[in-house]
Amino acid sequence: QVQLVESGGGSVQAGGSLRLSCAASGRSSSIYRMAWFRQALGKEREFVVSIMWNSGSISYADSVKGRFTASRDNAKNTVYLQMNSLKPEDTAVYYCAARPLGIAEYPYWGQGTQVTVSS
């Protein structure tokens, strides 16, 4: 099992920045890929970014390219999401997720952290 704990959410005005963190514990050595998803009120959950744990290869959703930056610190078993130039449409609960090699779905999820961007 892998446990994920997010932190860093909050409220900002449009154009502002926030940095989210996701700390992994438990069988973190089994992690192959980690990702951030978000879900706005009344909408389906959507992919934001994924990062391969060993290589650091990153993939972004088009909606956040150029504004969000993902990174990882393997020594701390933590991934980060630096969010700049935030827009009201970025308002959502942001979830960290992890999956092992060989599994397409993400079986491990954090509790989520709220990000609210006001205009």
Image (tube, grey):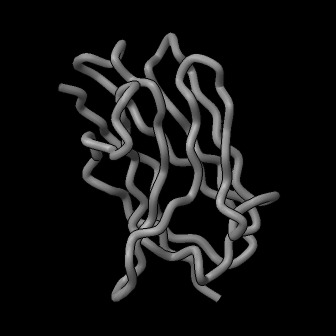
Q: Is residue 28 positioned above or below 5 on the image?
A: above
Position in image of residue 72 (x %, y %): 58, 27
Q: Is residue 62 positioned above or below 79 on the image?
A: below
Seen as rendered, the residue at the extreme left is 1
Count of numbered circles in the view: 0
Q: Is residue 40 left or right of residue 53?
A: left
- The part of the image, by quadrant, that contains residue 42 is bottom left
Where is the C terminus found, in terms of image quarters? bottom right
Q: Is residue 5 positioned above or below 37 on the image?
A: above
Where is the N terminus found, in terms of image quarters? top left
| Rendered residue at 59%/46% (across/down) | 81
Position in image of residue 18 (x %, y %): 60, 56
Q: Is residue 27 left or right of residue 6?
A: left
- The part of the image, by quadrant, that contains residue 22 is top left
| Rendered residue at 38%/42% (across/down) | 104
Position in image of residue 5 (x %, y %): 31, 39
Between residues 63 and 23, which one lies in front from this camera angle? 63
Q: Is residue 99 left or right of residue 55?
A: left
Seen as rendered, the residue at the extreme right is 66
Q: Is residue 5 positioned above or below 36 on the image?
A: above
Q: Is residue 48 left or right of residue 92?
A: right
| Rendered residue at 46%/49% (across/down) | 8
- The part of the image, by quadrant, that contains residue 32 is top left
